[in-house]
Amino acid sequence: MDSVGFHLAFWSLAAITVGGALMVIVSRNLIHAVIYLILSFIGVAGLFLTLSADFLALVQILIYVGAIAVLMLFAILLTPHAIRDNAETPMRYPAAILMGLVIAAGAFVALETDWGAMRDEAIPAQARVIGESLINHYVLPFEIGAVLLTAALVGAIALAREDEEDVPIHRDSLAQESLAQEAPGGLPEAAVAVAPPASGPAAGPSSPSAGGPSAGGGA
Amino acid sequence: MTIALEEYLVVAAVLFGIGLYVALSKRNAIGVLMGIELMLNSVNLTLVAFSRFSESAVALSTQVFVVFIIAVAAAEVAVGLALAMVVYRNRHTVSIDEINLMKW
């Protein structure tokens, strides 16, 4: 891991990852922030590749870039323009202090700890080993993960869908209310239509409960 | 200078700090979700780095753990975005300053 190409790959991928994450903070438009988040995810996938974790790099691209980021883009595009700003709350000053402390503590622990002996060569055929351990030793967490994903997707659908049964009923009750307001006497519309328009002057006193607009139309 | 475990851990720490800042300071609920995803990514990077450099015979177990973290992150973001859609439909905002119905 001393070759010039490896150094170039690591530092450029680290710059892409951290730079993309920083642009998530800086960019004012939420859609631009998601695009930079995708860039950061791709940088992490490249770092996985430099760590010889080829299976996880592909999973990272497939799930984070292909599913999660696209889901976020859809959720943003389904809301109007006015709430797409990426502004910050007044919590940003303590959050910035906390960020500095966390980065300093993490870097201090990473650099000062004696990590002991390091493996020189990466483990070969990682995807096969991961797959076998998923269906042998980790089969119960695997199944629980499957149930969790199913439950989460069913829950997301149940939360996000409109109640289609309620909407037409609501519209019918609204229409009936507006009809009742048009005929304040409580008369059905048929009774008003039955009144002969020719006997306009006579209709006024004969049906005093009829509303003003209908009587005016008859006269 | 050789690139070993420490460099990856420092990059992951920086990524975690940025994700923490985004999750704590953003006004938009979807922005907060983006910060949480950044933090999960940095933890994944840490685990994969330990898996690569550890001399343990079961070092690949950490990569299985990363697979589970990615699955849970996918479930979390699906439910979180559905919640954001419901909150927007009912209150016409996703600003976490104005979602204070259950605040003490």
Image (cartoon, helix red, strand yellow):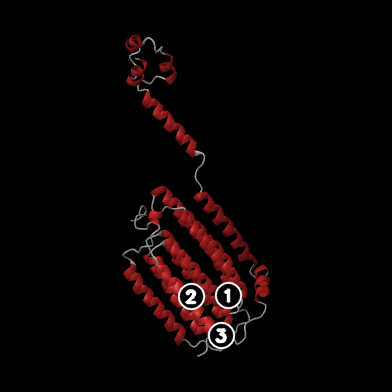
Q: Is mark 2 on a helix, strand or loop?
A: helix
Crowding at dot 1, Cα within 10 Å, few <14 / some 14-19 / many 20+, comes out as some
Query: Mark 3 falls within which chain?
Result: A
| In this view, the mark in front (1 or 3) | 3
Crowding at dot 2, Cα within 10 Å, few <14 / some 14-19 / many 20+, comes out as many
On screen, residue A201 versus residue A114, left or right, reads left
Q: What element carries label 1?
A: helix
- Residue A217: percent from left, percent from top: 36, 18
Q: Which residue is drawn at 55% across and 80% down?
A: B50
Q: Name the residue under label 2.
A: A16
Crowding at dot 3, Cα within 10 Å, few <14 / some 14-19 / many 20+, comes out as few
- Residue A6: percent from left, percent from top: 56, 84
- The amino acid pointed to by label 3 is Gly
Query: Mark 1 falls within which chain?
Result: B
Q: Mark 3 points at which residue?
A: A5
Q: Residue at x 55, y 62 (%)?
A: A67
